[in-house]
Image: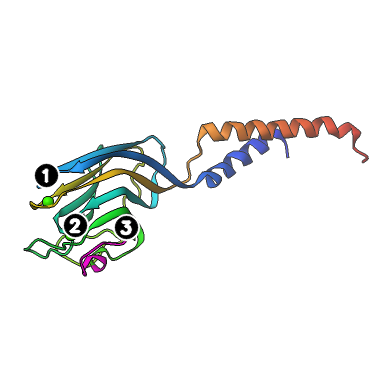
Amino acid sequence: MNRYLAIGVLFALAPGALAGVITGGPGAGFSIPDSGSAFSDITITNPAAIAGGLSVTILGFTHTWIGDLIGTLQHVESGTAQTLFHRVGRVSTGFGSNADFRGDYTFGNGGADLWAAAAGGGLVPPGLYSASGADSAAFLDLSNFFDGEAAAGTWRLTLSDNAGGDIGAITGWTLGMQVSDVPEPSMAIPLLAALVGGFALCGRARPNASV
Ligand SMILES: [Ca+2]
Ligand SMILES: [Ca+2]
């Protein structure tokens, strides 16, 4: 294998080796005002496209009446938005579930049914939940959430409170994304240097070979 062929093989292999999950954040925490809303942003610079979905983890999430809340993730530049949860337990009218958030909650692929977890009131156990929409206990599948869209840009988590009497807060939030195969120059260059250096060593060793 000559050096140019080796370089070609490197770039053929590098994308697969660099595929996987990228993470962003933590975004800033904030208080959720009674009958108001608040948001914070995470900026992603990785040029990959989302392929396989994403997840949102809300850290230190507290609220004493989750039926008040609507959570939304938006890619600001494209305007694409996805509901994470929408007034759990409320169908058309009413105040929804009086259950509480207290801990870290992730919304993403393969999560549990948040509506079922909140049905009995009390604490919703921290953990992984699927996204859910308005007026329905049928939870949404996030497995293709934002697929094909650019990971790069401004990602905004908005939490709105839609009834008086209970408030909450978050201490921060993070994003996890499954992305397509895109080599990053910062990793490809050291790999290239190591490979070229290895061939240079092989070239020096050849005169001493026994064949
Ligand atoms: Ca409560
Ligand atoms: Ca409230």
Looking at numbered disc 3 in the image, what kind of residue is underneath it?
Answer: Leu
Residue tagged by mark 1?
36
Residue tagged by mark 2?
66
Which is nearer the eye, 172 or 209? 172
Q: Quadrant of residue 42?
A: top left
| Dominant SS in magenta | loop
Instruction: Write the start and end of the magenta stretch as one range.
Output: 116-125
Label of residue 142 in the image: 3
Q: Nearer the viewer, mark 1 or mark 3?
A: 1
User: Of helix, strand and loop, which one carries label 3?
Assistant: loop
Specify which label sits upstream in the sequence, 1 or 3.
1
Looking at numbered disc 1 in the image, what kind of residue is underneath it?
Answer: Gly
Q: CA distance from mark 2 to mark 3?
A: 21 Å
Residue at the spot 28% in from the left edge and 66% down from the top edge: 113
Label of residue 129 in the image: none
- Residue 122 belongs to the span the image colors magenta: yes
- Image quarter where the C terminus lies is top right
Does the rendering let one see residue 78? Answer: no
- Side of 185 relative to 206 (left or right): left
Which is nearer the eye, 193 or 168? 168
Specify which label sits upstream in the sequence, 1 or 2.
1
